[in-house]
Image (tube, rainbow, N blue to C red):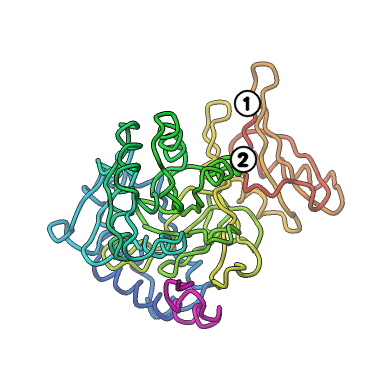
Amino acid sequence: MAEFYDSLETRPVEQREAAQLAALSAQVAHAKAKSPYYAALLATVEPGDVNSRAALAKLPVTRKSDLIALQQANPPFAGLTATPTGRLLRVFASPGPIYDPEGGGKDWWRLARALFAAGFRSGDLMHNGFSYHFTPGGVMFETGAHALGCPVFPAGVGNTEQQARAVADLKPAGYGGTPSFLKTILEKAEELGLDHRSLTKACVSGEALPPALRGSLRAQGVAVVQCYASADLGLIAYESAACDGLIVDEGVVVEILRPGTGDPLSEGEVGEVVVTSFNADYPLLRFATGDLSAVMPGASPCGRTNMRLKGWLGRADQTTKVKGMFVHPRQVVEVVARHPGIGRFRLVVEKDGEADVMTLQVEVPVADDGLAARLRESLQAVCKLKGQVAFHCPGSLPNDGKVIDDRRG
């Protein structure tokens, strides 16, 4: 059995970086030329100058959380697509609603790579438990399976007993869908005395895969790996059989940014996953997913050499309301940026009786009453709210990506 989907997965890190950065300028030029949104957003950007990570980091961020308003103001896709709606293959709706395009061509969502890493090979029948209704999950996995030469049973969601009987009758080799629904199907098969032993592999997504659930499915004979994908971007990252981090897909560039800003974080620091896609139809540049993760050091033991993510570590949108006023992560970053020498930091919001109280926690080598006073002044100037300051030793605040920690329950 071939171990890798293609040679891109095992190329030297330097070779991959050079190839992607070379393609980046062309993608920026394409987006400016074909997407009205990017034509306006990048009006002063020279595409040829976007040829490094540092140059990429200077481009503005487009946030998924803004898509609803952007699309309502300029339907259906806010001018982000580079292909006219009439030339798309399908259009989907995610909750919000957010409308998602699908262009033509083989494996448009790039899911084949993740399915291959999960063990799917040509001829394997896949039981597809993702919905085919409104959202693109079912189609994403189906087109990926077809790219591998795998037939698909479009099971969708619900009808658990019928799902279990289909597994017993059709004997699929593997499953695509959420891990919890796979567990439900297997439990129903056990209850009805139906044979599910043909299911030996699964590629799951759409929800968390805790170790206990993975172990439970493994005990029922199914080796499960997960992938990280979205309706906007397609595949972002995926697990291999090593189950040691999510390996970034070859068709995207991933950055980890401090939540609420465009500032890249160093390896190991938890921040927002921001993705640049090389998709020609939907050329999303620095697209902020709203998910938190961190880059893992080194390469996967499986031999794939691309960057690895720790997996989903929470949500990045930490905007909160204090005393009736919104406080945004970018404001907290601005406060701290006015005072060099600070390490990690966070704004903690709590209740004191019925009153909202906020405290800026910062890591500094030496506590300084003068610095505390200056930070309080900056906090009031930027956020228009009074707050306290608490000093902490370097390295003592959690590395969890939180800029605002709302503890009011």
- Examine the rendered structure and indicate whether residue 11 appears above or below residue 109: below
Question: Which residue is under mark 1?
Answer: 408
Residue 296 occupies quadrant: bottom right
Disc 1 marks a residue whose amino acid type is Arg
- Examine the rendered structure and indicate whether residue 262 appears above or below residue 93: below
Question: Dot 1, how many residues are within 10 Å of its Cα: few (below 14), some (14-19), or many (20+)?
Answer: few
Could you tell me which residue is drawn at 33 percent across and 38 percent down? 95
Q: Which residues are magenta?
A: 1-21
Could you tell me which residue is drawn at 65 percent across and 69 percent down? 298
| 185 vs 233, nearest the viewer | 185
The count of marks equals: 2
Of the numbered discs in the image, which one, if any, rests on residue 162?
none
| 383 vs 98, nearest the viewer | 98
Could you tell me which residue is drawn at 59 percent across and 44 percent down? 215
| 264 vs 149, nearest the viewer | 149
| Magenta run includes residue 104 | no
Disc 2 marks a residue whose amino acid type is Ile
Q: Quadrant of the C terminus?
A: top right
- The x, y position of residue 407, in whole percent, is 65, 30
- The x, y position of residue 203, in whole percent, is 44, 53
Question: Which residue is under mark 2?
Answer: 404
